[in-house]
Image (cartoon, helix red, strand yellow):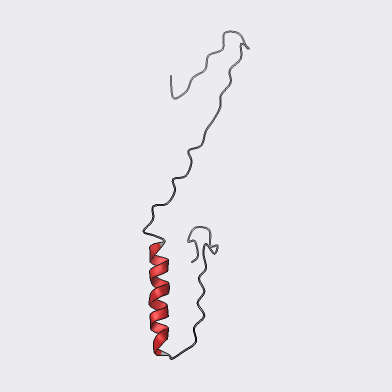
Amino acid sequence: MIGVESSRIERSFRRDYRGEIDGVLQELRSLAQEMAAMFDKPAAPEPKPQHKLSLGPSPQGAEVWLNNR
């Protein structure tokens, strides 16, 4: 599976099969179900970025505004 945005391989699957050609279809179905199951689980939310702001007493009389406040 290749990430559309990153163009990187996100996950790979491998199946070794020996047998009659008719059994290949069942292997493909099994692989497709495994791949689809990945999307049934909700993705973990990305952590929100945290920022720290420290203010000191200088320069004296300075004002700090954030979002017009």
Q: Position of residue 16 (x, y in %)?
A: 52, 80
Spot occupied by residue 18 in the image (x, y as percentages of width and height): 49, 87
Q: How many marks overall?
A: 0
Q: Nearer the viewer, residue 22 or 57?
A: 22
Residue that appears at 47% across and 23% down: 66
Residue 39 drawn at (x, y percent): 39, 60
Q: Is residue 27 left or right of residue 54?
A: left
Kindly indicate the quadrant of the structure image that contains residue 21: bottom left
- The extreme top residue here reads 61
Task: Spot the residue most to the bottom.
Answer: 20
Pick whichever, 9 or 59, lies toward us.
9
Q: Residue at x 38, y 70 (%)?
A: 33
Residue found at the far front of this picture? 19
The quarter of the rendered structure image containing the C terminus is: top left
- Locate residue 58, reporting x and y percent: 63, 12
State the residue at coordinates (51%, 64%).
11
Q: Nearer the viewer, residue 20 or 3?
A: 20
Looking at the picture, does residue 20 appear above or below residue 37?
Answer: below
In which quarter of the view is residue 35 placed?
A: bottom left
Determine whether 6 is above or below 24 in the image.
Answer: above
User: Would you place residue 12 above or below residue 49 in this image?
Assistant: below
- Relative to 55, residue 7 above or below: below
Please name the residue shown 39% across and 89% down the image: 22
